[in-house]
Image: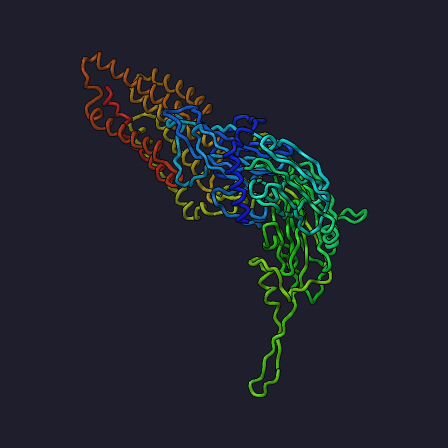
Amino acid sequence: MRESALAVLLAWTLAAQQGLCGKLEKIAQQPSNILVDYYAYRHISIIHFNVPERTVAVAFKFMAKEEKTGGIGRCSPVNVSLYLKSASLPFVSPDGSKVAAKLMETKNRRRHYSLEMQSNGEQYMIKIEAPSAGDWYAIAFRSWTDPEEGKIKQQGISVSCETVMDAEMFVEMPATTFLVDPEIKYKVQLDETSDTTIVQYLVPDVGLEEMSLFLKSSCGEDCNIAVHITAEDNLAGSLFNSTEKSLSFKPYPGDFHYVTLRLLSGNASNVTLQLPTSRQTDIGVDQVTPVVLSRKSFPEFFLFDYEHLRGNDTKPQPFNVTADALSVLSFEIGRVYDVGGTVTLGFKLVDVEEKYKKNIVLVACVSLGYYLNITSGGACVRAQGLTTADVYVNATEPAYVHVPFPEAGTWYVSLRVFCPEEEEKKTISADSGANISSSTSSCSCGRTCLQGDVACESCDCLSRCTAVRVESVVSSSPCVEGRCGGHGKCMHYMSGGFVFSACHCTGGYRGFDCADDTYVLSTSGILLQLLALTFSNFAFLGSIYVAIRREYFTEAVAYFAVMFFSTFYHACEAGEEIYSVCIMRLSVLQFCDFFNALLAIWVTLVAMASFGPRLTAFCQVTGAIVLAMGAEMDRTALWVFLLPAVTGSALIGLSWGLRCRRRRTIKYPSRPYRTIYFPAGVLLVFLGLICYAFLQTRRNYYLVHSMWHICVAIGVILLLPKRKYMK
């Protein structure tokens, strides 16, 4: 594998030196996609491409930039992550979240390409030689950062930006193409004017055997030729710089295979190709017993089953797995509409003989495009080497494996049952040397090979059972069997015109199935946050008392409303569904909290302006109407807070200025309020605003926000003037 990778890398280097980029032609440009911060898989943006058949090379170009949408300041570039894959959405976990469900290992699935970039307007490119034709999906998002360290930005105070991504696709088509019978030798010519060609073969089912492509070159070491074999995936690639070469690969049965040749260096070469199939076909197919599955589709997204039915049966029936043949199930995953959910594969042993119940193990190997052999040690024989099986099933309970966002194409499940032999252990008498007792233990290598820790090529005592009956579950559903554990809800999302399923986790849980509790607060932590955010509102009791003592009864009602609704709003949203107390819908509580906070600011400023009772009542009612409208339009916007603050400050300046002019003095209001209470109150409220606007993070939110409650409550006590100070 390492030598093959180095050869492909060298081929790309030589191709770039020859000006490969100049041969690329743009055939697709995708509309701009808006990217958001990644906190869960539902935050991805999907970009779709359709690569034509018989493509020599494809290049995907991406460019991300920042567009200002509001606020103060300039937009700075952010980190952007992008993943690209053929036939389905890339399944990634950039946050490193844990998954409780057993998933098919990523290394056993089709590879995806990754790209880390910045939204600085520069172009980034992913080039792929001899790509598979059909659907390619890119997912992009603002790179994940620890949410606990992220600052809570107040809308309108800091700059507000959108990250926009543009995407284009360029392809290089071959100079010549040929459809060839695999059994015959075929000669193609490569030269400077015709340096690329694709030879197309229709390959039959060759069973469990690999195939070998034989090549001969007329220029030998004087030429460098890049060779790639592609079906629905890139199966093999190498650099050809000798007279003869063979390239082995595992073919997709009954599918077209494309051999791409590119002359990298040298003047010209005649290349002879041959792909013999007869011998392997006779050997491989007899070793396989197919198990026929029938598809049952449902009207909802990503819901379908594959069942093993016999005759006119309407219920799934078990099937036999025998020792002398590999049992293979196959099922189809369709393009676009089937790839947004999760395929669940489950198996159960039924009617197992009593003597086998303790040791029997069913081994299942899952693959895309071709079926796998299973070694005598219970390992899967994949193109990249031996791997452990995807599913191990014993007689006590069924076992499952899940495939998130399965690639379109034909999937196969190879099955084989093993019954480890019993090894006899004898105890020898110390006196006579006679065997006086015996005990048995299971096959030692069988225990190792069938645990999923080691991929064993062989195990002598790991025998196969004569026959066993197996029930299968092959079903597709959103998320994991339509659920997200007990800490989330399975939802459907749409991006780029494509629907996919993802979990919306609650209570601090995260991950594909909401099983990662890294950011989940302990019960005591939740209670601490709840008490801090609610009890800090009781500081307004002092504001209410002072307002009543100074005969500001309307203001006292406003302060009571702030205390009441803020307390119950935080009691509802901060309890994480453990200690939550919701007296009404959260959205209603949020509106009441914001509106009454704005109203309290307004009536306090009007009271400080010290108008007469009629003008004060007019200002209070007018302000309440305008603020209710603003809170409903956008309660978190900066202008909603600035409107009462600026208008109220202007009224104070106007009122105090007129009185100073009428009295011909600047000593208004009275000295204690002017020199002590007013500056102290303004300073305290300003300190609270600084904390609220710039210091809040998700980790310290409950502390800083509680401090904001206390600062505002004490600030109101200082700013609400005594009547005698305003005369």
Give the camera-side residue of 363 and 161: 363
Q: Nearer the viewer, residue 720 or 354?
A: 354
**Residue occupying the point 56% across, 26% down:** 29
Q: Horizontal and vertical percent for residue 462?
A: 65, 64
Q: Is residue 483 above or below residue 388?
A: above
Quadrant of residue 321 within the rendered picture: bottom right
The spot of residue 192 in percent (x, y) is: 58, 32
- Residue 64 in the figure: left or right of residue 535: right
Q: Position of residue 160 (x, y in %)?
A: 41, 27
Residue 318 can be seen in this image = no
Q: Is residue 146 left or right of residue 184?
A: left
Residue 39 in view here: yes
- The quadrant in which the C terminus is found is top left
Quadrant position of residue 304: top right
* Rendered position, 415 above or below 155: below
Q: How is the image coloured?
A: rainbow
The vertical placement of 346 against 152, above or below, is below
User: What residue appears at the point 34 percent right and 15 percent down from the top-left corner?
Assistant: 615
Relative depth, front residue between 482 and 705 = 482
Disc tally is 0
In the orientation shown, which residue stands out farthest toward the top? 662
Q: Point out the residue furthest to the right here.
A: 312
Q: Position of residue 670 (x, y in %)?
A: 20, 22
Q: Is residue 442 left or right of residue 618?
A: right
